Image (cartoon, rainbow, N blue to C red):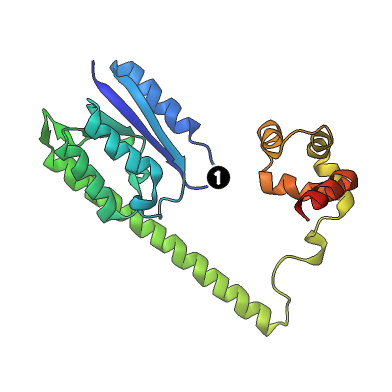
């Protein structure tokens, strides 16, 4: 049976890679491919691959395990830097591992040999992805400059309006569950797992619980 690993990535903490895993898993089931492992992370595709933990682990894993294919939903999951993504593909090919791109039903190896057509298509797709990212960045920067210019010309205060700042009462209401769990003595990490609220946000809620906050000050003081 063909043994594969899945590579999934999303760009922000607000996104979820469950859809990628589901679609790739369904495809592998259809093709009778055995999923050996799933590599996933929430990190910007603009970050260098040398800084992306899941890429480093993946390349090490395929060298020490008998893996036939690495499956991705789309080629941008390798990263949006064309040269670095092509280096990943080359490393996979050199180790006899085929890259399968589901959205294009594309494989970089055919009968163990490099597929020149697939290599060309991968290069083109990566270049398009990189150009799109650069265009979006330029548009955002242009919009930011225009916003600053407009505000200065019309003497408009930049940033969030004063009304945006949440009052203590609103915070108590919004984070009532987190505050209740703090009173019960649960740890920051436990509360974060239960509520989905970040540890840093929960830590700031101590000020709404004077008796606990005073104890913390006494401990750290």
Q: Residue at x 24, y 20 (%)?
A: 2
Res 83 seen here:
yes
Looking at the rendered image, the quarter that the N terminus falls into is top left
For label 1, the residue is: 13
Residue situated in front as seen by the camera: 200 or 38:
200
On the picture, is 40 further left or further right than 127? right
Q: Residue at x 20, y 43 (%)?
A: 91
Percent x, y of residue 29: 35, 17
Residue situated in front as seen by the camera: 32 or 105:
32
The 10 Å Cα crowd at callout 1, few under 14, some 14 to 19, many 20 or more, is few
Q: Does residue 157 lie above or below 57 as drawn? A: below
Q: Does residue 131 lie above or below 178 as drawn? A: below
Percent x, y of residue 32: 29, 15
On the picture, is 166 further left or further right than 61? right
Image quadrant in which you'd find residue 7: top left
Q: Residue at x 18, y 40 (%)?
A: 118
Percent x, y of residue 97: 20, 33
Percent x, y of residue 183: 84, 36
Q: Residue at x 39, y 62 (%)?
A: 134
How many numbered marks, from 0 up?
1
What kind of element bears circle 1? Answer: loop
Looking at the rendered image, the quarter that the C terminus falls into is bottom right
On the picture, is 163 further left or further right than 126? right
Image quadrant in which you'd find residue 83: bottom left
Res 105 seen here:
no
Q: Does residue 114 lie above or below 51 as drawn? A: above
């Amino acid at each position: 049976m063909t043994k594969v690993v899945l590579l999934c990535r999303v760009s922000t903490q607000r996104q979820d890679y469950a859809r990628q895993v589901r679609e790739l898993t369904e495809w592998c089931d259809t093709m009778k491919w055995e999923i050996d492992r799933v590599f996933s992370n929430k990190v910007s595709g603009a970050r260098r691959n040398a800084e992306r933990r899941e890429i480093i682990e993946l390349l090490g894993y395929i060298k020490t395990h008998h893996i036939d294919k690495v499956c991705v939903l789309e080629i941008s999951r390798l990263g949006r830097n064309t040269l670095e993504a092509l280096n990943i593909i080359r490393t996979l090919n050199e180790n006899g591992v085929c890259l399968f791109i589901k959205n294009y039903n594309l494989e970089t190896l055919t009968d163990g040999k490099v597929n020149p057509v697939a290599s060309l298509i991968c290069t083109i797709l990566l270049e398009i992805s990189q150009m799109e990212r650069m265009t979006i960045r330029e548009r955002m920067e242009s919009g930011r400059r225009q916003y600053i210019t407009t505000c200065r010309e019309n003497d408009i205060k930049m940033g969030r309006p004063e009304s945006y700042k949440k009052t203590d009462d609103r915070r108590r209401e919004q984070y009532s569950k987190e505050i209740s769990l703090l009173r019960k003595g649960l740890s920051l990490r436990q509360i974060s797992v239960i509520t989905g609220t970040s540890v840093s946000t929960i830590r700031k809620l101590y000020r709404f619980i004077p008796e606990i906050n005073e104890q913390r000050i006494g401990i750290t003081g």
